[in-house]
Image (cartoon, grey):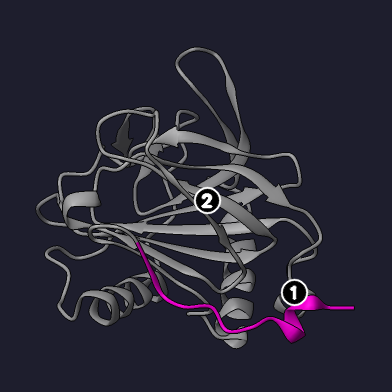
Amino acid sequence: MNEGLFRLPRERVELAPGAWHVPDWLTLDEQRELVVAARAWAAPPAGMRNVVMPSGGVMSVRSVCLGLYWEPYRYTEQLPTGERVKPFPPLLGALARRAVAEVYGSSPSDPYDIGLVNFYDANAKMGLHRDADEDSPAPVVSLSIGDTCVFRFGNTETRTRPWTDVELHGGDLVVFGGPSRLAYHGVPRIRPGTGDPATGLAGGRLNITIRASGRPGR
């Protein structure tokens, strides 16, 4: 039985000042479109890979960058292998602008020009971190497709409590800006088998994070 068919409506929640969780924001058709696009973005060259941290650790999440390549802890226009990063898609810019307008009632301060597509399998997770390598204060826009995850949204000072745990389902939106723009956040676990196969994603969770670099001329 697909429990999603009988799921009660979930309410929009402010996780912290300036940080909002908006359930079921993406339509099923929009999720399908993003899954198709993500497959193209993930293909070589400059395709999906596991990021290696300066400590030598390898992230369990597989990622592909769009617009600019993120390597800890900076942005470049090329991957370490010399491949040029794929361009930032207008589709993601339009979704980010729409999200900010709907949540905050205003336009973003800078144009969105960076996309990070993360794929989580059943065992993947993301430690608490801050999106602090951009020069723009524009809110971060995060979209979820596929399996439900536990999303942990913390404070701006440390990786320790206080934090809030919330379940993100396929189609959910999280936007965080203002006083929460540099809050620590992460994904401690995935709930395998909870995604809607009608999206075209056969297992796992797809997370698309959209940011503004704040770099002049981009």
- Quickly name the residue at label 1: 196
The x, y position of residue 84, in whole percent, is 42, 44
Q: From which residue to which does the magenta span run?
A: 1-14
Crowding at mark 2 (Cα within 10 Å: few <14, some 14-19, many 20+): many
- Whether 205 is among the magenta residues is no
Q: Nearer the viewer, residue 155 or 109?
A: 155
Q: Is residue 72 left or right of residue 45?
A: left
Q: Nearer the viewer, residue 88 or 157?
A: 157
Q: Amino acid at mark 2?
A: Phe
Helix, strand or loop status at disc 1: loop
Q: Using the image, tell me which numbered label, if any, was put on residue 182.
A: none
- The quarter of the rendered structure image containing the N terminus is bottom right
- Whether 9 is among the magenta residues is yes
Above or below: residue 123 compared with residue 18: above
- The quarter of the rendered structure image containing the C terminus is bottom left
Q: Pointers 2 and 1 in contact (CB under 8 A)?
A: no
Q: Using the image, tell me which numbered label, if any, was put on residue 151.
A: 2
